[in-house]
Amino acid sequence: MSLILIRKSDSMSEEEAQMKLKLAVDDPLTVLLIVYGEGADIEAVLEVAIARASVKNAIRRVVYVPDVSVMSSQQKKAYFRKGKAAVSIGLDDKIAKTLTPRQARIRAYVEQAFVHAESQGVENHESGDIHTHRDRDIR
Amino acid sequence: MNRVISILIAIVIFASPVFADDPSIPSQAEVRVQLPVSLKTAITFIEHPEKKAPRSIIYPVHLMAVDYKSELIILPDKNIIKKISASNRPVLPELSEGVQNWLSDIPKLIKAASDYVAKTSETLETLDKTAPNKESLKTDDVKYLQQKIVEQGKLGREIVDLIVELAERKAHYLYKDDTAAFDEEINRITESLLKANIDGKDVDVILNVEAFALFVAEEINFAKQIISKDVEAANKSGIAQLRMKAWLKDSKNKESAVGIKNYYEVKSYTGPKRPRVAFRMTEEEQQRVEQGLEIANDAAKLIEEFQEKKEALLSQLQKLQVETQQKIKKLHPAIDAMKKYIISDDELDTIDEIIAAAEQYEDATDNQKKALKELKSFFESFNKDIQSIHNGYVELIRVTDNITPARLTVLFSKFPEKIQNALNISLGYPGKLHQNFQNIEILFEVLAAMTEAEATTRLAEAKNIIDGFVANTKKLLEDYLEDYAALSNAVMQVVFRSQVVEMADVFESSANDPRIRALSIDDIRSGFINLDETPADHGDNLYIDFELFTLTENGEEHVIDAGSQTFEIERFGLTDDFSANLIFIDRIGKGSPSDPETNFKPVPSASWTLHYNIRVSPGDSWLRGFYRFLDPGIGINTTAMDFENKNLQFGIGAHVTLFQNLLIFGYGYNLQASKDNEYYYLGIGILETMNTVGSLFGK
């Protein structure tokens, strides 16, 4: 199963949840797609993310954070971007791509986020959002 | 004398390098590359001087000056102008370099895809093997595996980025701002590469390498087609056109139109041009001025007439528009009221039955039966006709809601069918009504003749319905139909007049000149100005304006780009002129003891001077610039003087001038002195001095 749930619950404290996230990020041989939020739209995102992760189970993981408040301030700074439904994290533990809620439901963009994370060597830095023609037009 | 000749020869020798040929110039393409693309840089010029080879004039490399007898060739670059005209339309940006590269080598693409598949498989297999012992991997092993992941990731990224770029381009072209449709299209295009056909499960991209290559090739071709179509569409729609006009302005700011062959039809100047070197001044120059004035007057008169006509048209149009709008306003209540007069189905059925009963009356005459048949047909179509007229009113109000010349021009070309139908019905309706009122009388006659009880009842029934109908119809249809016909007529008048005003507007926007011919960009060709067929002369300026424009759907002009170019008119090469001078003569020798002293005595003189004018461009040798600054001339003059108290004696001399005849130095011979006839002189050109001083204080 490639889904990792990060949530405070009766069986898991906030600190434990933060540690779980850290371990997932620190895994030197996997790339992550962290999905944020709740609701039917996010469920659709998760479905696509898990489907794309399953294609390369060995190196891809999906981390689900329904409530971002569970993350430490340091983790939020490093892995959360306002307005984005998902971010991909490369082997250097930095954000490789971010996805808007609309993009995160589309297989091609999720796959793009994963391969960008996979291509990111340990010395690469955050390369920012996926810009589509639409976004360029809007700008 | 020998001294003078020596000086003159020295000057000629000194100046000889100045007369060298024009230095080599960069090519037009080289210059154009350095300048931003615009209509001004899309148009280049060639001067074809009299009896000399053509030469390019490139802005800003060369001085923009032409000889007064040259032919000036205007060369619009069709390809650049097409690009300028297309640049206003939304054209998709070029495909990225990466995509261009892929297109050029599909086999390479297939190989890259195969490598990706191979590398990914290898990496995943290796990771699968190490998975159970992941925790105990050594650092080097981890680094090795990371390297493998990154290698396959880079290949995958290149391929996925390409897929996304192509899919986005297609989706954007098809759906532009429709976000939902855009997303659906992206999904549709890419799904086949990300899901297995058989079971719909997600698979690694490009599982089928050949299918992937085919997908990429198809999408790239589509992208290329979009771009070429957009540029073509941009150029064709709106029919971009190029027009230009030219005019001369002399030193007194008097303007005269100058013809450009293929673009601006102005009648040629047929008067004689002043020769470069002439010994007669006044007559030719006078004629030149006269003819120039004639051409200017012709154009001014034509434009004035047109403007007056246009003003009159505008005034009539405005009046018509107001009247028409008032009529429409007046009829507004009638539009809704019309619906009330539609006969109900029940009433129609009743009338039908009554007429049928009357038709069956045995004693009804043939004429009566014919009338009844007509009446039946009239009632059957009545509601439909009223509805048509009603629809026509509504449509008329809608289209004339905002009467502008541009809108009405469109109306003129495709007058709405609804209005036309309604007009056709209403124009013939008064006659039809009158006829059927008579038919109604005949119906009543027949019913009255029927003696049976049923007929009497029917008569009463018919009278009841039809009396009401007649009363309403008479008022409504007669009054409003006439008004409607008059109104439609008024609208047609407005449309027609506005068409004329629209044409006047077009001419006005064509720089006030109906002689301008605009060419569509596919038909663009060179323009030619033959300056020898114009009054152009030294000191004038030639102005050329260009405009690239389109016509919108409403017939309005939209200027895409405009430019202009000014040329100084010169007389290059050997040329002469006449000037009046104030000279100070100094007699060589004292003459007789009784002769008055002539020591730089001021006297008037008239000179004829030869110059050799050269072109000087930015970047030329400083010698050429210096020569032009000095503007040396040589010539002869005649002087009125008095060496011997004889009131008037004449001398002739030879001189050298500088600074456009502003300064003059010479040597002369008094023809009438008895001894010591020679003199030398210094002088200033009177008119040139006045011009110079005047220019210091502005115009």
Image (spheres, coloured by chain):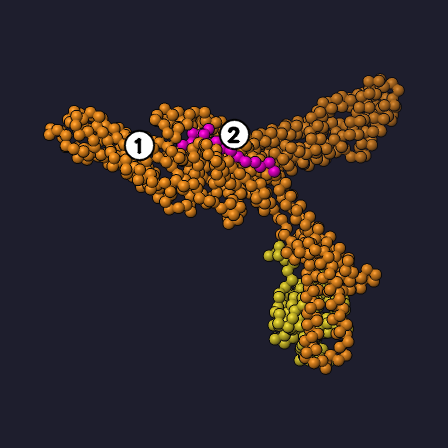
The residue type indicated by label 1 comes to Gly
Residue at screen point 28% across, 34% down:
B655
- Residue B504 is situated, as x and y percent measured from the top left of the image, at 54, 31
Which quadrant would residue B497 be assigned to in this image? top right
- Chain in yellow on the image: A
Q: Please identify the quadrant where the C terminus of chain B is shown.
A: top left
Q: Colour of chain B?
A: orange
Q: Please identify the quadrant where the N terminus of chain B is shown.
A: top left
Residue B58 seen in the figure: yes
- Residue B137 is situated, as x and y percent measured from the top left of the image, at 71, 80
Specify whether B518 is left or right of B174. left
The residue lying toward the viewer, choosing from B275 and B239, is B275
> Which of marks 2 and 1 precedes in the sequence?
2
Residue B289 seen in the figure: no
The residue type indicated by label 2 comes to Glu
Give neighbour class at mark 1: few <14, some 14-19, many 20+ (Cα, 10 Å). some
Residue at numbered disc 2: B265
Q: Secondary structure at mark 1?
A: strand
Give neighbour class at mark 2: few <14, some 14-19, many 20+ (Cα, 10 Å). some
Residue at screen point 63% across, 52% down:
B94
Q: State the extent of the magenta-drawn residues as a range.
A: B522-537
Residue at numbered disc 1: B635
Q: Is residue B523 magenta?
A: yes
Residue at screen point 48% across, 38% down:
B55
The residue lying toward the viewer, choosing from B65 and B248, is B65
Q: Secondary structure at mark 2?
A: loop
